[in-house]
Amino acid sequence: MIKKMLSVIICLSMLVGLSVCVCAQAEGSNASSVEADVGENNSSENSLVKAKAAILIDADSGTVLYRLNENKKLPLASVTKIMTMLLVMEAIRDGKLRYEDKIACSKYAQKMGGSQIWMEEGEQFSVLELLKATAVASANDACALLGEAVAGSAQGFVKLMNDRAKELGMNNTHFDNCTGLADTTEKQYSSAYDIAVMSRELLKHKEILEYTTIWMDSLRGGKTELVNTNRLIRSYSGITGLKTGTTSKAGFCISASATRSGTSLISVILGSETSEERFESAANLLDWGFANFESVNPKIDVGKISKIEIVGGEEGEITPVFDKEAKILVEKGSSDGITMSIESPKSLSAPIEKGQKIGKLVFKVNGKTVGKIYLISSANIKKLTYFTVLKKLLLSCVSK
């Protein structure tokens, strides 16, 4: 029996050693299960927009539907506050802040100019109240205080903003403050594309819609009125936000989001000459997008998704899974022509993390890729070690 056990251990050890050089690696880990290719350049449709730069994207997939100077670096005024709200929502998600937490107004926040709720130094507000004042009334004092609450200082928060922008791939963006104030700064800029990216990220936090869709509200028991700076909130069907911005240097700007019949779009306008042109341009882009595109749940032939062999793992194979609620954006009337192909390796080397991308489904219409849905691992699979091999062998022998 002892000789038999030793023989089996040696064989298994050789297999573990060989697994090091056998197979393809996964595409990455812990990423979103949905991705779509960038759309065609539609900058010829300039009659839709009166602005220095603009973009229209699908909020679910990130597909670009329209673009005009989308990577041009421009001042963004209070549209900056989208990044502030994103970091606040992430802090709440991570348990670093709570909506009910009370924050005392600092001397720094109290000195903010421009739009504000006129806080007094030492006056206390809840995170919920500060978030509402920021999202609805674009209050700079409330925004600055939120930044201090998250990072401990204004400078620390600006660093977080720039770090997060880098993580999101916002390569044409730099923040100098969290409010968008100060036309004198040369360091505060972004692009229509980058703003669309951070707007899309903010919208993943569904709770923010409770604030960005408010038209009128109040604070201090009704003594301080809040009126949304985004007039599309009361005039555009399906509007969900998101943030306006205006300074003499930036002109009139907006990131406007809306959802109709399951399709969610984000329209960014930078550098319009008037407020009217800003809102009209944003609405025109949204109208154009809803008129020409729709989100669909693609038909997926589950039977064609094969198991993947795991070499050198505690489990020998895994069946990839996917987000059944994932959507892709297609031109209206083309959904019947969608075809699907599967791209996945026959084998992978352990370890494999739960949620790791291990393949993808590619959807096309008339040969053009319209969307991708990643296949992901449904479980963690640890790498097989000598100890686990020995443990399993001993348990097998004991069970006999």
Image: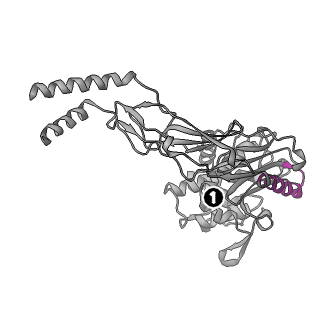
Residue 267, image x and y in percent?
Answer: 76, 51
Horizontal side, residue 105 vs residue 267: left or right: left
Q: Which residues are magenta?
A: 271-289
**Colour mode of the rendering:** one colour
Give above or below for 231 relative to 325: below
Q: Pick the residue in front: 400 or 398.
A: 400
Horizontal side, residue 290 vs residue 134: left or right: right
Mark 1 lies on a secondary structure that is helix
In the image, residue 390 lies in the stretch drawn in magenta: no
Task: Tally the marks.
Answer: 1
Residue 78, image x and y in percent?
Answer: 75, 53
Q: Pick the residue in front: 178 or 308.
A: 308
Q: Is residue 21 visible?
A: yes
Report the amino acid beneath label 1.
Answer: Leu
Residue at the image position 70 percent from the left and 68 percent from the top: 214
Give above or below for 256 relative to 165: below
Give the image quarter of residue 33. Answer: top right
Tell me the quadrant of the picture where the C terminus can be found. top left
The residue under label 1 is 145
Give the image quarter of residue 6. Answer: top left
Residue at the image position 39 percent from the left and 42 percent from the top: 380
Q: Main secondary structure of the magenta part?
A: helix
